[in-house]
Image (cartoon, grey):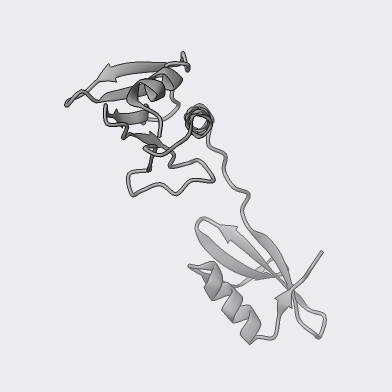
């Protein structure tokens, strides 16, 4: 396990982070250029070696309900990697996922299209709305009950 001083040295190797002292000799490190309300990257780095990094939007980590991962047992490389990823996540504009669009085919040759529109999953026959569902699973159940299967490309 890295010592408090070793962790502090690694964290302070990120010049974009600003150190702020908090209670009980703990330190927080903020990324003030964050595109989000959240600016804390490292939270409550404690002299006992405990601390947290904000990874709510970082793939590969399992954050707690606050979006934090404990760094107590992290190696130097792991700590650098997680901090770099956390800063990049706070510096990146969120992208909107493409809305779902699927074609389903019946054995008789007819097709239906499922489109995600305004948080609904609508089933169309050509340009005509056949059915609307509040969840994707409901649309899939309906299509399967009617004998349709997802058309592969």
Number of numbered discs overlaid on the protein picture = 0
The residue depicted at 57 percent of the width and 43 percent of the height is 96
Could one spot residue 96 in this view of the protein?
yes
Q: Nearer the viewer, residue 24 or 88?
A: 24
Residue at the far top in the pictured view: 15
Q: Quadrant of the N terminus?
A: top left
Q: Position of residue 7 (x, y in %)?
A: 40, 25
Side of 149 relative to 89 (left or right): right
Q: Position of residue 24 (x, y in %)?
A: 17, 26
Q: Position of residue 85 (x, y in %)?
A: 52, 32
Which residue is at 76% across, 81% downward?
A: 106
Q: Nearer the viewer, residue 41 or 134?
A: 41
Q: Residue at x 42, y 16 (%)?
A: 12
Q: Can residue 33 be seen by looking at this rendering?
A: no
Q: Is residue 77 above or below residue 142?
A: above
Where's the C terminus, which quadrant? bottom right
49 up-or-down from 106: above or below: above
């Amino acid at each position: 396990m890295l010592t408090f001083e070793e962790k502090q040295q690694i964290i302070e190797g990120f010049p974009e982070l600003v150190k702020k002292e908090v209670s009980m000799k703990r330190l927080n490190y903020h990324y003030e250029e964050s595109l989000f309300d959240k600016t804390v990257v490292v939270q409550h780095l404690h002299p006992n070696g405990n601390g947290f990094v904000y990874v709510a939007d970082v793939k590969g980590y399992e954050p707690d309900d606050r979006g934090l991962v404990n760094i107590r047992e992290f190696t130097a490389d792991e700590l650098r990697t997680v901090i770099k990823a956390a800063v990049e996540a706070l510096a990146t504009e969120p992208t909107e996922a493409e809305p779902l669009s699927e074609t389903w085919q019946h054995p008789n040759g007819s097709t239906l299209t499922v489109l995600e529109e305004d948080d609904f999953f609508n089933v169309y026959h050509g340009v005509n709305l056949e059915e609307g569902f509040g969840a994707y699973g409901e649309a899939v159940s309906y299509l399967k009950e009617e004998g349709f299967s997802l058309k592969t490309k």
